[in-house]
Amino acid sequence: MKRSLALLVCLSMILFQSCIFHSVSKARTQKREREKEARTAALDWLGLIDEGKYARAYAEEPARLRAATTEGQFIRSMESRRAPFGRVLSRKFIGAAFTSKLTGSPDGRYESILFRTSFEHKALAAERVILAHEEDQWRIVDYRVY
């Protein structure tokens, strides 16, 4: 009887650990996939900014942000914030962070992506792109160069 009970306990522990490992593994896979999708969207959008296609980048923003600013305002903002750095020489992904809360925005799914970037007129900078998962895709809600 004791032997059967011990065997049952051991099997239960093995199955429990297997379930935990599977759950953790699945969560990591989902996290990597989410980060990859957000990073791809960020790089696509940054490509538009790098090429000076500000109107097209503006069109990629969520409707709620486009309602708060005009295309002309966005273009002037990018011309003053990004254009002075010149062309991109290199851009390296540093990391990503997920959150469901963002100051000044409704609760949702947000991913903050950080890049180490070298520009023509700034040897070392950090670019942060914050994306929101809206309308079944990642859309840029904030961009900063430090």
Image (cartoon, grey):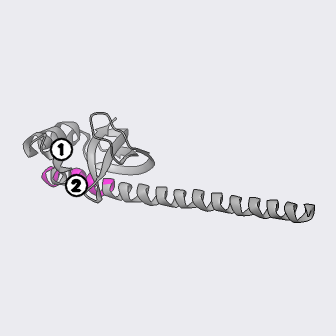
Quarter occupied by the C terminus: top left
Query: For this rendering, which residue is in front, 20 or 45?
Result: 20
Residue depicted at x 78% and y 64% = 11
Query: For this rendering, which residue is in front, 130 or 20?
Result: 20
Can residue 3 be seen in this snapshot?
A: yes
Is residue 92 found left or right of 59 in the rendered image?
right
Residue 75 image offset from top left, x and y in percent: 13, 44
Residue 15 image offset from top left, x and y in percent: 71, 63
Q: Are marks 2 and 1 in contact (CB under 8 Å)?
A: no
Is residue 95 found left or right of 90 in the rendered image?
right
Query: For this rendering, which residue is in front, 76 or 118?
Result: 76
Give the labeled residue for mark 2: 48
The amino acid on which the numbered mark 2 sits, given as a three-letter code, is Leu
Q: Which mark is residue 65?
A: 1
The amino acid on which the numbered mark 1 sits, given as a three-letter code, is Leu
User: What secondary structure is found at the residue carrying circle 2?
Assistant: helix
Magenta-highlighted stretch: main secondary structure? helix
Residue depicted at x 31% and y 34% = 103
The crowding category of the residue bearing disc 1, from other C-alpha atoms within 10 Å (few below 14, some 14 to 19, many at least 20), is: few
Residue 101 image offset from top left, x and y in percent: 36, 39
Which of the two marks, 2 or 1, is nearer to us in this view?
Answer: 1
